[in-house]
Amino acid sequence: MKKIAILSGAGISAESGIKTFRDSDGLWENYRVEEVATIDAWYRNPDLMTDFYNARRAELEHAKPNDAHLLVAKLEEHFEVTVITQNIDNLHEQAGSSNIIHLHGEATKACSENGKRFVQDIGYRPIGYDEKTPDGARMRPFIVWFGEDVPRLSDGAHAVEQCDILIIIGTSLNVYPAAGLLYYAPSHCQIYVIDPKEVQPISRDVHFIKKKATEGMRELYDMLCSQ
Ligand code: OAD
């Protein structure tokens, strides 16, 4: 079976009603990254960050996977698929993908602020300001913030190194190291980019499908599965 790696970003979940970061109505229009998405900000104002991620988690409660997530999952009928996502939502899981690497953490999990230990599922409930993990440390969202390691990066790189087909979908490719993963693709690899807008320039040959995720993924699914 041929291997497919999917590198997904916020745009794949846009049609499920979840805001992207850098589009005109994106999250970073209304919040400053430095206040809600860096490790420094957590130590400066953990209550604000707790609120911000409680809101993100609450938004997810009623979000459903769209056809792009579902088609990514359905690719498993024909290919060996690894999903590498920058998204903290659980829509790839809900769609039925079985091999998912969350590069930037997961909204429905919490951990301790010291060393991200005691990772636990918390579903869609808010984290309280005074909540502690069993070691007595403050509980924080299980998210990779700017300034932190990306522990699953090497798993993502391994999946891209092995793939025959790489599908990049719904990411502006602004954020490293995630954006650099595409350069791990072997030279024989076919690379597809699905996005309604231009993304950052890519120094590789790519097939650009300038469409929304649901439409672009349908087109690509039909093409790949008829080959
Ligand atoms: P961005 O907001 O930077 O990019 C979203 C991309 O999705 C853009 O290229 C849009 O054109 C595209 N897009 C919008 N609607 C779409 C649709 N319906 N179908 C397909 N594509 C669509 O989001 P990311 O690249 O995911 O990290 O951002 C990367 C990281 O930056 C995030 O994981 C987050 C953020 O800061 C952290 O917070 C650590």
Image (tube, rainbow, N blue to C red):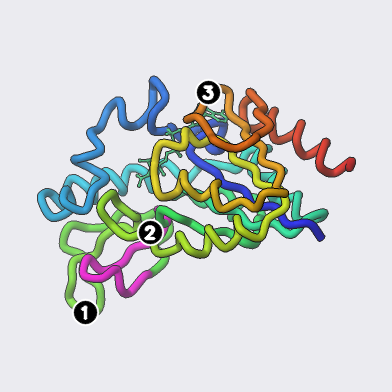
- Tell me the residue at 33%/63% (across/down): 110
Q: Where is residue 80 shown, x and y percent of the image?
A: 74, 59
The residue carrying pointer 3 sits among few (fewer than 14), some (14 to 19) or many (20 or more) residues within 10 Å by Cα, namely few
N-terminal of the pair, mark 1 or mark 2, is 1
Residue drawn at 56 percent across, 48 percent down: 91
Mark 3: C-beta under 8 Å from nearest atom of ligand 1: yes
Instruction: Quarter of the image for the N terminus: give it.
Output: bottom right
Where does label 1 land, which residue? 135
| Distance from the alpha carbon under mark 2 to that under mark 3 | 26 Å
For disc 3, the marked residue is 198
Residue 110, magenta (yes or no): yes
Q: Find numbered disc 2 in the image and state the secondary structure of the residue it sits on.
A: loop
Seen in the picture, residue 100 relative to 206 is either above or below; the reply is: below
Give the label, 1 or 2, closer to the camera: 2
| Residue 95 at x, y percent in the picture | 64, 50
Q: Which mark is residue 150?
A: 2
